[in-house]
Image (cartoon, coloured by chain):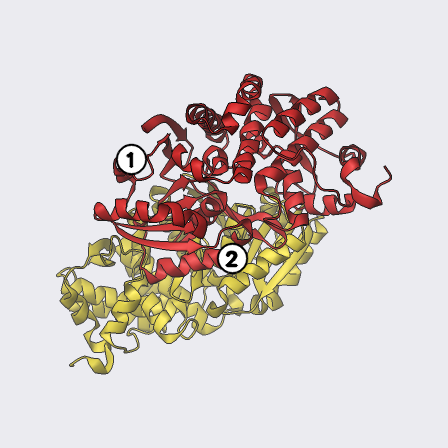
Chain colours: A yellow, B red
Amino acid sequence: MGKLHTVQVDTPSHDYPIEIGTGILGDFDILKPYIGQKAVIVSNDTVAEYYLSFLESCLKDNHIEVLSVILPDGEQYKNHESLNKIYDELLLAHADRKTTLIALGGGVIGDTAGFAAATYQRGMPFIQIPTTLLSQVDSSVGGKTAINHALGKNMIGAFYQPELVLADLSVLATLPEREFSAGMAEVIKYALLGDADFLQWLEKHMDALMQRDVELLACAVKHCCEMKADIVAQDETEQGIRAWLNLGHTFAHAIEAEMGYGVWLHGEAVAAGMVLACRLSEQIGCLKQEETERVCRLLQKARLPDAPPAFPFERWLQHMRRDKKVQNGKMRFITLKSLGQAQISEIDDMECLRQALLPFSGSQSVL
Amino acid sequence: MGKLHTVQVDTPSHDYPIEIGTGILGDFDILKPYIGQKAVIVSNDTVAEYYLSFLESCLKDNHIEVLSVILPDGEQYKNHESLNKIYDELLLAHADRKTTLIALGGGVIGDTAGFAAATYQRGMPFIQIPTTLLSQVDSSVGGKTAINHALGKNMIGAFYQPELVLADLSVLATLPEREFSAGMAEVIKYALLGDADFLQWLEKHMDALMQRDVELLACAVKHCCEMKADIVAQDETEQGIRAWLNLGHTFAHAIEAEMGYGVWLHGEAVAAGMVLACRLSEQIGCLKQEETERVCRLLQKARLPDAPPAFPFERWLQHMRRDKKVQNGKMRFITLKSLGQAQISEIDDMECLRQALLPFSGSQSVL
């Protein structure tokens, strides 16, 4: 029990720690240096049931004025209505620029609450308490905040760093199996984009990780956070290598948009998206088919999809043209130079893309 | 005709120039280094009628793909609906992170379009072309962007710097008299908060300035921009002295909220607010009554109100408690140590505030 690791994130705009441990959710000593006299907790109804009253008590016992805003659970609520609900509550509570906003939940809560913090009175301090594996290894770190727009995922947002990220591995015990797997997709992503040794380590330990072995999980979370901190320190606002973290995401966003947000979990879509990124890497001559198959096997071990749903190539294109990596109208993808080494590829040849997507382009393709 | 002055703004996050001149609105040489292959112009129906087709032609002639978004004119449209209209158009036009957003208009357009630029895909480049005196001397400089919320003005926003500010004095010729005066309120604000010599200069030249003498106006705009650039360079995100620029604004925001946005022009409310700030400065023993009267005379010369509308003290308090300068629940005001020297004052003694507002606290006060 207690604090196990600290990962320091240093960006041009702000430095802050990620505290990783077990049973640290209500550890006021960790929160104390980062919290004002008043705090507003944003959570969802699922997470709130398990952990909200515990966190509220911890703060109230230490004489912090606390208000909680509970959003419905699900990616479909990462939208303007939820954002406005947070703004309304902040204004009604007379929250000011010294009030601390705490995001208690997964990626949807972190992104939505983070964007509210970035824009309420042009910025208020906020703390991330990620409660899913996905948000612990990825979305809570690095200061990307956003909401979805009917025409595209994460289209409205800001780069805004938290004061603190508190990752308590104990809370993963209550995470549904599908969500746990979805988080594992992002863990595997780090191995693919930048660390072949970590890929081997994951292959070796995936069964134990899926059994939620706390010590192994702590190692994995720490390693992913370190990799992300290193990338974000070099490129806070995604002018270059930060885009590697989007491995599989251009395809994933198309899957999510096509299926309707929340039908596939984000991590599930990322898993299928990474397979497509591998297939595209094959098409441009970087990866061998057996390497893609090796990735598929690891995804299967993590109980993740290794193929996307099928829909027409034109629909894939339509969704992907809205990707934030598009520059001056040109489509850019994160591909793999090799397993463990990402690169940014501008894809001019639509035939490469068509081939990569061929088995998944539905009835309009000739198979 | 042409470029008269360049003021350089250097902030921790971004450096950019303010180009001041006459007839420079369609000078592509000035725009060229800052513009992508695609540009989206945001304007309002009033300004668009005068200048939009001219700017569009200038860009199209230089092979820039241009789309324009026209909002209705008025402070009451600085809201979520306008913001969403901009987002929708950007998404439908497949605008990406290299597309340039151009704000062509006054403070409302600059603030709304600037906030859209700050948050579309987590930030796209934007150019300010302020077309009112107020926006040329104040709101287009320094990177404050925001929209209003039903419960408070400028409550939702971001600090986000433009690539370029282009201030063309020629466009002031078409500005209605009331709007020109409103801009002059912000010019006077700079003198009061930081430059007693400039105050004397304004007293001497106010009649000619009100006749819109272009050379004197260029001097005044340049001087205000230099003062603002200096303050913003020291304190981009308003941790300290940048708050001085809010002289009169806490009261002004209360007036605007009470009367309904757009009934009083922002500059008119700031003029009355500065008189109240002077009266509060008297109450805390910093200013003499004759100094407040001197300020009132200058405001009258600029055809500005030197007193606010009357409404109950409780309503004043209610509005002002939502001010962004409130910290940990304490009310903070910009007051004057002397004419030409601002300071931040935490006001604990409500009696000081009551006395300053006494003649303007409506029927519930005993006069």
Residue A170, given in percent of the width and then of the height, sits at 53, 61
Q: Give whichever of discs 2 and 1 has the lower sequence position.
A: 1
Residue A244, given in percent of the width and then of the height, sits at 29, 54
The three-letter amino acid code for the residue at tag 2 is His
Q: Secondary structure at mark 1?
A: helix
**Mark 2, mark 1: which one is toward the viewer?**
1
Front-most of residues A311 and B74: B74
Q: What residue is rendered at 67% in x and 33% in y?
A: B306
Residue A295, given in percent of the width and then of the height, sits at 26, 67
| Extreme residue in the left direction | A285
**Does B75 sit left or right of A286 as displayed?**
right
- Image quarter of residue A149: bottom left
Q: What residue is rendered at 29% in x and 73% in y?
A: A306
10 Å crowding of disc 1: few (<14), some (14-19), many (20+): some
What mark, if any, has residue A194 been given in the picture? none
In which chain is the residue bearing label 2? B
- Image quarter of residue B70: bottom left
**Does A17 sit left or right of B153 as displayed?**
left
Label 2 and label 1 in one chain: yes
Quick one: quadrant of the C terminus of chain A?
A: bottom left
Residue at image mark 1: B30
Q: Is residue B16 visible?
A: yes
The three-letter amino acid code for the residue at tag 1 is Ile
Residue A113, given in percent of the width and then of the height, sits at 53, 56
Q: Are marks 2 and 1 in contact (CB under 8 Å)?
A: no
The residues bearing labels 2 and 1 have C-alpha atoms spaced at a distance of: 32 Å
10 Å crowding of disc 2: few (<14), some (14-19), many (20+): some
Residue at image mark 2: B80
